[in-house]
């Protein structure tokens, strides 16, 4: 038995970077997007029944096994498995979770950098979230069909944000919501905050070692590539310049939809 904690997240919000920063040999072990949780999330979309709850309980028991004595396990599910946030926290009353998110604009820029395949992936986010979200968008089948790629992604993000707000209200102090902009702006403060939530005992010296190590100097998904704050900002600026008009229109449109539905775009942190 060992504590198991979660970092649920919206797309492209530096969740991999956070997991790497929290992965300290002998203290914590980070598990990135285990496929079994996607399988379980798809099962829960079909039926939230006793059999699937039992499957989830078993999987969490297996994932929680430490590789070394005294380790805490931190699991980062893919955002396609966000459906599991509530049942996972219900199954493990000792568990806690970070709900990490980005604003819509940087998410859209991240997708645009990936061209056609990024746009297709963005539509998948929408269809995945729409299959189980409690947020009724009120769109007809025709309305949905004629959405642009970025509009679909924006609505998928909005449904995930609505879900995170539900989870935060349901579990209170067991979860905390973190804006990725705050994480990137002051990663030391964010790591200290997560350490307190997960009871990891990270002190200032350990956090300083993480900050000055390779984690924040390399691309989180391509470890051989230098990628600090300057490179990240340059990438974002290039995408903004190339697609400024489309970005502005979609951001304002999603903001209008959110206002109509009463969904907070920046939910208060727990």
Image: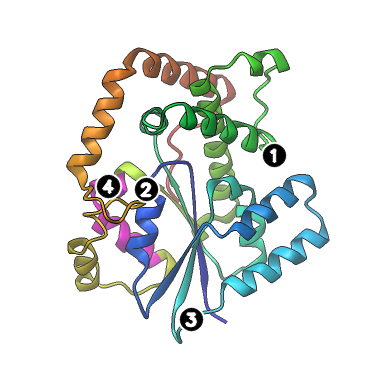
Report the side of 88 relative to 232 (left or right): right
| CA distance for labels 1 and 4 | 31 Å
Residue at the limit of the structure toward the right, as seen here: 50
Q: Residues within 10 Å of mark 3 (few under 14, many from 20)?
A: few
Q: Position of residue 132 (x, y in %)?
A: 69, 39
Q: Residue drawn at (40%, 32%), measured in percent from left and top?
A: 114
Count of number-bearing discs: 4
Q: Which residue is mark 2?
A: 14
Foreground tag (1 vs 2): 2
Q: Which residue is label 1 attached to? A: 132
In the rendered image, which residue does mark 3 sit on? 67
Place of residue 63 in the rendered image (x, y in percent of width and height, measured from the top left):
58, 71
Q: CA distance from mark 1 to mark 2?
A: 25 Å
Provide the secondary structure element on which disc 1 rests: loop
**Could you tell me residue 57's position as x and y percent?**
70, 68
Q: Nearer the viewer, mark 4 or mark 3?
A: 3
Say if mark 4 contacts mark 2, CB within 8 Å. yes
Q: Give the alpha-carbon distance from disc 4 to disc 3, as whole Å.
A: 30 Å
Q: Which residues are magenta?
A: 182-196
Q: Quadrant of residue 128?
A: top right
Dot 4, how many residues are within 10 Å of its Cα: few (below 14), some (14-19), or many (20+)?
Answer: some
The label number, if any, that marks residue 184 in the structure image: 4
Tag 3 secondary structure: loop
Badge 1 or badge 4: first in the primary sequence: 1
């Amino acid at each position: 038995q060992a504590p198991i904690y979660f970092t649920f997240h919206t797309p492209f919000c530096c969740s991999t970077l956070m997991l790497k920063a929290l992965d300290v040999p002998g203290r914590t072990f980070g598990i990135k997007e285990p496929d079994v949780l996607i399988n379980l999330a798809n099962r829960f979309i079909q039926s939230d029944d006793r059999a699937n709850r039992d499957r989830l309980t078993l999987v969490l028991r297996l994932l929680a096994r430490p590789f070394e004595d005294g380790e805490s396990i931190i699991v980062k599910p893919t955002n396609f498995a966000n459906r599991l946030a509530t049942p996972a926290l219900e199954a493990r009353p000792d568990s806690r979770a970070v709900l990490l998110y980005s604003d819509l604009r940087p998410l859209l820029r991240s997708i645009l950098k990936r061209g056609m395949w990024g746009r297709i992936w963005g539509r998948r986010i929408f269809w995945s979230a729409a299959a189980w979200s409690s947020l009724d968008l009120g769109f007809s089948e025709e309305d949905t069909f004629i959405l642009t790629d970025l509009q679909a992604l924006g609505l998928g993000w909005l449904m995930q944000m609505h879900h995170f707000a539900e989870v935060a209200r349901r579990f209170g102090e067991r979860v905390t919501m973190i804006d990725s902009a705050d994480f990137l702006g002051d990663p030391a403060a964010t790591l200290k905050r997560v350490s307190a939530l997960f009871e990891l005992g990270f002190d200032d010296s350990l956090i300083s070692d993480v900050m000055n190590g390779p984690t924040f100097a390399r691309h989180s998904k391509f470890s051989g590539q230098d990628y600090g704050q300057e490179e990240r900002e340059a990438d974002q600026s290039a995408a903004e310049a190339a697609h400024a008009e489309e970005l502005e229109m979609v951001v304002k449109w999603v903001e209008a939809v959110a206002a109509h539905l009463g969904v907070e775009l920046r939910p208060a942190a727990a």
